Image: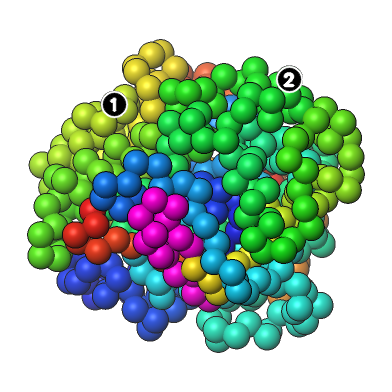
Amino acid sequence: MKLLTHNMLASTVRGVSQGYPLGIAPGAVTEVHACDFSKEFLVHVFPKLEWSAFVSACASLSLPTMPAEVTPASWEDESFLRQMHHNLLEVHVQEGTLICPESGRQFPVSKGIPNMLLNEDEI
Amino acid sequence: MATRKAHSRPELVAPADVFYDNREARKYTTNSHMIKTQHQLTERALELLALPKDAPPQLLLDLGCGSALSGSVLASYGHHWVGMDLSEAMLRVAVDRGVTGVQSADRQAPVDTNPTGVGVAAPVLFDEDDEDDDDDDEDGDDDDEPGTGDVMVGDLGQGLPLRTSLRLVHGSGSLSRHAGAPVTVSARGGETAAGGVFDGAVSISAVQWLCNADSSGAVPRLRLRRFFATLYAALKRGARAVLQIYPDSPQQAEMITSAAMKAGFSGGLVVDYPNSTRAKKYFLTLCAGPPSTSTAVPQGRDGDPDDGGDGEMVRSAKRRKVAGAGAGGGGSVRHPQRKGGADWIRKKKEQRMMRGYTDIPRDSKYTGRKRKSGRF
Ligand SMILES: C[S@@+](CC[C@H](N)C(=O)[O-])C[C@H]1O[C@@H](n2cnc3c(N)ncnc32)[C@H](O)[C@@H]1O
């Protein structure tokens, strides 16, 4: 699971109204899955992100910190862009647990794949 | 497709997560006929998705993404896709094929270390050599940025586990976080309070599964409703979803279509090759928003897919891919006017435009470009 995906995921367990952002339990195992850098894509995807959720997710995985505020200068800052690319698209959570902030429901991530399936009584 | 030969409707055999077990997932993904068919269907779906011309790489959903035969096509156009599927076995094959990126540790390793043993030449998506660069790129931008994908286990019938716009607005979303983005971003207008964030969605050969009451308590109508409501919420307003389906009857096609309309989508069913039993294909082409001239349902392809008619563009594009797939990466030489080449495609498009077709894909820097995903 990439952090871009994490940024989009929410818990939709019955009775939960926000279910976002999903916490990442301590001890998650990550890998790096390299992919091509595209500034164009980063610029395009930025307004789609919940930036603060991304910043916290990076912190939970002890990744290099992303700035809380993105300024116009950030888009000219090569090291910011590279780090954003890396944290958002290349870092892959292999093993871990996602936690619904409202219900505490846990969603496992196993071999890089989060499982968002609900039980019948959670729909 | 071995699967369909044995059971022409696997959705009637068992639930998807049972049917697509490890063995079937592997069989599916290495079947050359299956690969070819899914690639063609995805190419067509992308065409119907009508993404804005000269747009940056897009953020797309692939619903029922399976082992990413469809996702690889999206990525070959540079898009980033997020896929969901009920079968973990299928998703595992996708990850093993390297659709999420090239695992750093074995980046230098020879391709035949593919741990799955799936007969797929490992992560080819990110291979930069023998690139077929278009000299006549309109924007002169020959940066090639193949996209990447990511997958999750989920049941479309339970709805998509994605945050909606409400969360975006009421979450952390201080407006200041937009301040830094170049103006073009905020001017796009899609990412407003009313809409989701995905630029589009495709689903290839999956949604008919929702019509089966395959587990206790599964009510197809309810499942379709949840699916379409959450899909609508996930999409940027005005974005399209193209769902290629195999309905088992006109009633089923109608049930799926009307569920989509009830969720607020406009659009309808595009039928390609309606007169051919074998080639006939259904694409539910939807727009997340009210009907307008820009959301009018495109025409289906007609004529005989096997003669030199309308089906040919896709078929010959495929032949090019196969040519590129040979050992030693042959086929990288440019033959601009050869059948299937970029110029040839442009000429064909012109001819079709003259004949009054309206569903002609725009030219882009990717026009006629060899797909990297065609190499397995
Ligand atoms: C014929 S395969 C197509 C896979 C992929 N789109 C492709 O083009 O190769 C159909 C896929 O739909 C998935 N599927 C069926 N029902 C589903 C459901 N309710 N939720 C999610 N995925 C489902 C199956 O697991 C299978 O991977």
SS at badge 2: helix
Q: Which residues are magenta?
A: A98-112
Can residue B184 be found in the magenta stretch? no
Can residue A106 be found in the magenta stretch? yes
> Picture coordinates of residue A103 (x, y %)?
35, 55
Does the rendering let one see residue B335? no
Q: Amino acid at mark 2?
A: Val
| Disc 1 versus disc 2: nearer the observer | 2
Quarter of the image with the N terminus of chain B in it: bottom left
Q: Which residue is at the far top?
A: B293
Q: Amino acid at mark 1?
A: Gly
Residue position marked by numbered label 2 in the rendering: B183
Q: For mark 1, does the 10 Å Cα neighbourhood hold few (<14), some (14 to 19), or many (20 or more) residues?
A: some
Using the image, name the chain to which the residue with label 2 belongs.
B
B118 vs B163: above or below? below
In front: B339, or B114? B114
